[in-house]
Image: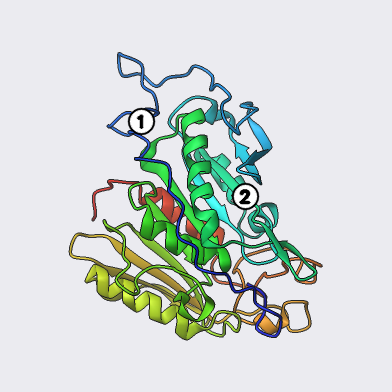
Amino acid sequence: MRPAALPLALVSIAALAAACTGDLVAHGTLDAGGSGSPTPDGAIDTSPPVAAGCVDDVSAGDHTYRCGGRPVDVRVPPACEASGCGLILLLHGDTGTGLLMDGHVKLRDLGAQHAYIVAAPTGPDYGGGEPGGTWSSADDANLVDIVHQLAAVYRVDRRKIHVAGFSRGGFVTWRLLCDHPDLFASAAPGGAGDGTSFGEATCFSSGRAPATQIPILFLMGRTDASVGFSSMVTIRDAAIAQYQAIGPTVIGSDATYTHNRWTSPQGFPIETFEHAYQTVADGPWADAKGHCIPGSTTDPYAPQYAIPCVGPDSFVWGEEIMKFFLAHPLGYVPR
């Protein structure tokens, strides 16, 4: 989302288009045990992937696919030419792009280290003379379809499909975890709260909640001037109430941040990183203040999507997302 001083493109609440039917098992791409396309003797299938749908090049490396009319920047680690890798859907905010978002969190680099394919689509034009894209609920079905197509072609481990997003992409992340808890093992929204004031259908409001609990990692800027800290507290508290979660337990903290965890009776966590960092005071996103990404090393004066927090920061958001996803596959045994 753009800083409060700039026009905020409010989106209409379109009904979610029919998503791909069933989960990945129903698609016939993955076995019920969760591993991708095993051979009859149970070994991992090392045969090469086969191009299909919008995935027209299955070689390892960086690709820009066009899926449902949208560009999708994807990094496929060499290890993921065999089945069994994970998959992360990464979603930018207003005026961003998939590549700019990844520049802030570097999940493509982290995914390559841990055998995860990372898909970073770019949304429809933001408009109003501003660069980059945005999202609305009308895009949700296409995003789910992108996940299904990539998962099918690369025969990913269905237990390791995750979604992360910031700002407008964070609102989408809240919706997707609410509407597709059977698809995503865990979710990491950031800089996005209760959608009521922003024309967004999110989650944990008006009776909306995921049918099953999934682990949530949530980034909250205490001085966020674009979304507002109180809006994020609202959705956090509603999620805690829905999960009947107990806490918080402080996992880490200093004068600039606190990492808290609440845990449901079933053992599923809701974790938050509340921080006091801000954008650079004389940069193009100065008005956003705490609406920024800790640990980002991108140029704070860049002409587009300049939302790094001013360092030094006590944690790196992209690294925390990756650690959380690695620790919380679908069907993990709560500790």
Residue at image coords 46%, 85%: 230
- Vertically, is 57 above or below 112? above
Q: Check residue 241 in the rendering and tell me which mark sits there, or answer none.
A: none
**In the foreground, 256 or 325:** 325
- Vertically, is 288 above or below 269? below
The amino acid at mark 2 is: Pro
Quarter-of-image position of residue 129: bottom right
* Neighbourhood count class around disc 2 (C-alpha, 10 Å): few under 14, some 14–19, many 20 upward: many
Q: How is the image coloured?
A: rainbow
Q: Which residue is mark 1?
A: 35
Question: Would residue 6 be found to the left or right of residue 45 on screen?
Answer: right
Give the x, y percent position of residue 335: 23, 56
**In the foreground, 179 or 4:** 179
* Neighbourhood count class around disc 1 (C-alpha, 10 Å): few under 14, some 14–19, many 20 upward: many
For marks 1 and 2, the one nearer the N-term is 1
In the rendered image, is residue 316 in sight? no
Residue at image coords 31%, 14%: 40
**In the foreground, 83 or 150:** 150
Q: Which residue is mark 2?
A: 121
**In the foreground, 69 or 191:** 69
Question: Would residue 224 be found to the left or right of residue 237 on screen?
Answer: right
Tag 2, which secondary structure?
A: strand
Quarter-of-image position of residue 8: bottom right
Give the x, y percent position of residue 125: 71, 60
